[in-house]
Amino acid sequence: MRSLTVIALIGALVCAPSALSAQPSMRLTPPAEAFRRPPVQLERDAQLSLPPWVTWIGLAATAALGTSFVWSAATLRDARIARDTGQDGGDAWFVRRRRQAIALGVATGAVGLATALVALFATRWDPPSAEIWVTHEGGGVSYSRTF
């Protein structure tokens, strides 16, 4: 058994230099005709490239709708009190104010969500600028971004 191991070891040492210098017979890349379609490109340019003022208009619209919603919720409280005390037309006033408050709340949420999505995915913001300086009296770091 020992002689067989020694013979295998000597054979491996003799064949090793030729095995290292031999070219591999397997092809690592498939031929070009193996692909029927062009490869998929994962990187793409953004579909929308809106200026920042679009986001600011959306933010202003969200703030205006939110203010109207708060006002409507305050008048809804007054309408509820009128309904509970039994004033004439208090029930109809309460129903109108409740519908108005719900509509303004939903509109505020929808416009706010749309503004956030436009700001994150469709607005072309200017790239940030960073600056680092060091002097014998001290140093500093400055980072700014235009919104």
Image: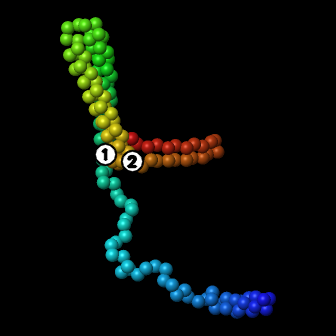
Residue 99: quarter of image: top left
Give the percent coordinates (x, y) of residue 32. Answer: 38, 80
Position of 57 relative to 128 (above/below): above
Q: Is residue 8 left or right of residue 40?
A: right
| Camera-nearest residue between 116 and 83 | 83
Q: Nearer the viewer, residue 139 or 55?
A: 55
Residue 143 coordinates in the image, percent (x, y): 50, 44
Q: Residue at x 34, y 46 (%)?
A: 123
**Type of amino acid under label 1:** Pro
Lower position in the chain sequence, tag 2 or tag 1: 1
User: Label 1, on which residue?
Assistant: 51
Disc 1 on helix, strand or loop? Answer: loop
Image vertical order of residue 129 relative to residue 109, above or below: below
State left or right for residue 97 relative to residue 140. left
Residue type, numbered disc 2: Asp
Q: CA distance from mark 2 to mark 1?
A: 10 Å
**In the picture, which quadrant includes the C terminus?**
top left
- In the rendered view of the protein, which quadrant contains the N terminus? bottom right
Q: Which residue is mark 2?
A: 126
Label of residue 118 in the image: none
Mark 2: secondary structure: loop
Q: Residues within 10 Å of mark 1 (few under 14, many from 20)?
A: some
Within 10 Å of the Cα at label 2, are there few (<14), some (14-19), or many (20+) other Cα atoms?
Answer: few
Q: Position of residue 59 (x, y in %)?
A: 33, 35
